[in-house]
Each structure stands twice: as C-alpha cells, then as structure tokens.
Amino acid sequence: MSGLLALLDDVAAIAKVASASIDDVAAQATKAGAKAAGAVIDDAAVTPKYVHGFQAARELPIVWKIARASIFNKLVILLPIAMLLSQFAPWLIPYFLLLGGLYLCYEGAEKVYHWLVPHDDLSEIDPETTQLDETHLEEKRVKGAIKTDFILSAEIMTIILANIDPGSSWVFEAAVLGLAGLVITIAVYGAVALIVKADDVGLAMVERGRFAFTRAVGAAVVKGMPGFMLLLTIIGTAAMIWVGGNIVVHAVGEIVWHWPYDTIKAAGKAVSEAIGTAKGFVNWFTVAFLDGILGLAVGFVLIPLVGMVSKKEDTAH
C-alpha cells in the first residue's frame, strides 16, 4: 500500500510539473504572440479579398484551404527552420527580424501612398484570370493567398522566436512556437470566416427575421460591413507601420546602431515625465508613435527602391 501511495505522489508531482510547464508555455506563447500584432492584423485584413467575387457556398471552403496551408507553413516548414536558427545560428535572428520589419514598413507605407495618391492598381488586373473559369480562378487565388500567408507566417514565427525568454530549452521554444503559431492561425482564419460570412448572416436576418429588431440588426450588419472592412484595413495598416518600425529599431540596435532605440526610449520617458499623468500609457504611446513615424519614413524610402528592382526584373525577363 505504501508503494502505491508513493507512486501516486510521484504521479501527482509529475502532473504538477507538467501543469506548470504548460502554464509557462501558454504564458510565453501569449506574450510572444502579442508582439506579432502587426503581422497578425495584416493577415486578417488581407485574406478576405481572396474570396471576393466567389459564390457564397465557396467562401468558407476557400478560407479553410488557406488556413490549412497556413498551419502546414508554420508547424511543418517554419517551426523546424526557426529551431535550427535558434540552436545553430541565433545571431541571424536579428537580421531576419530586420527583413520582416522592413517588409511591414514597406507594405504599410505602400498602402498609405495609394491612399494619398489614388491611381489604378494594375497589379490587381490579371488578364489571365478574366479568361479562367471559377474553378481555375479559385486555385489561382488560393495559391496567391498561401504565398502571402507564408511571408506573413515567417514574420510571425520569427517575432515569436525573438520574444521567447533567453535560456529556454529547445523543447520549450518549440512548444511555444507551435502553440502560438496554431492559436494565431485559428484566431486569424476564424475571424476571417466570420468577416466573409457576416453580410450573408445579416442578409438572412433581414429576409427571415421574425422580429423588427432582428431585421434591423441584420440590415445594420449588411450596411456596416464596408465601413468595418475599411476600419480593419486602417487599423491593420497602422499596426503594420508601428510594429515594423519597432522591429527595425530593435533589430538595428542589436546589430549595429543603438542610437535610434535609445533616443526613442528617452523621448517616451521625457514626454511621460513632462505630462505627469498616466505615465505608463503616455510613455507607450510616445514610443509607438515615434516607431510608427520612423516605420513610415523607412517604408517611403523602400517604395522607389522596390519599384526600381521590379522594373529591372521585368526588363530582364
């Protein structure tokens, strides 16, 4: 009997350790995942356009195809690459972060530029797609979405890896990366599914609702979706620029130049001290604002550079 009690004590102790480890993984996944906010919001804002123009019955299957590929990208391809970097070349992580930050700055600044200087986006007009039937068009759209998701997923996984507490074991890092990547994917594509079906749900409420209140809510949903999508795009763009600038500042500080990071940090502290109230929020807002200004400036510098490279590639082909 004493042997059985000792065994049960050991099992209970192991269970406690396992429970604590799971809590630690979840806490780290939440903390690290929050740092990827810019790329996550961008993912949620970009994906709905890939189901635009298809029959309502095909919207959720298309979202599922993209989500399934996103999980594969994160857990099967990017997670092992991230672990190899962490174990054998951790010094490369700031460089990958810098690339991801520059990408976010460029994407955000390009959207702002298009708002400031409206023009026809010829990249959205693909003569081939006008000749395709819906099945082939769906395949083409899904492939494009998966390609975009892979880039955003690479940024997300790199940001998560960089924000895991140093000194963690490789098993712990893998668990945090896997959990955070999975939760982010479920959250993003769950939100996308709700967004793309919201107008259909609203329309059904208008047509089938038994009560005036239900029909009014449905009508409000249908009328409000275009504005909601615009708001989501604005928030996503602002988040991209802010997070991109923040990543660039931190990565440059780790690689070669500490002045931008130290200056922005000092400015945040100085402004919060000068105002004197809500110091924590004022400090955060000031740093985020300056990161965003820097990110926007970097993005605007990159726009013509990327354009020049694209022209050279087109000329070469």
Image: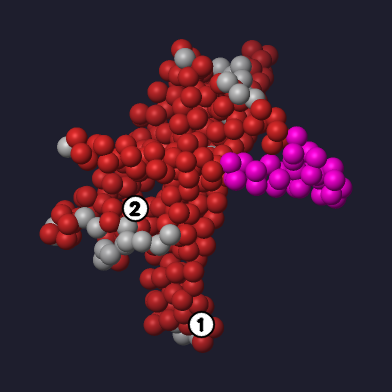
Above or below, comparing residue 5 to residue 103 in the picture? above
Q: Is residue 281 magenta?
A: yes
Task: State the residue at coordinates (42%, 34%).
Answer: 154
Secondary structure under tag 2 reads helix
* Segment colored magenta: 266-294
Task: State the residue at coordinates (74%, 39%).
Answer: 267
Quick one: label 1, few (<14), some, or many (20+) residues within 10 Å? some
Please state the horizontal and vertical placement of residue 140, each as a whole percent of the image: 22, 50
Task: Name the amino acid type tagged 2.
Answer: Val
* Label disc, if present, on residue 216 of the rendered structure: 1
* Label disc, if present, on residue 122 of the rendered structure: none
Please state the horizontal and vertical placement of residue 45, each as a whole percent of the image: 45, 54
Direction from residue 61 to residue 93 in the image, left or right? right
Q: Is residue 303 visible?
A: yes
- In which image quadrant can residue 249 be found? top right
Please state the horizontal and vertical placement of residue 186, each as a whole percent of the image: 45, 46
Secondary structure under tag 1 reads helix
Q: Please give the residue where the numbered disc 2 appears in the rendered image.
A: 63
Q: What kind of colouring is applied to the model shown?
A: secondary structure
Direction from residue 96 to residue 122 in the image, left or right? left
Check contact, mark 1 vs mark 2: CB within 8 A.
no
Task: State the residue at coordinates (46%, 69%).
Answer: 225
Direction from residue 59 to residue 217 in the image, left or right? right
Q: Residue furthest bottom?
A: 212
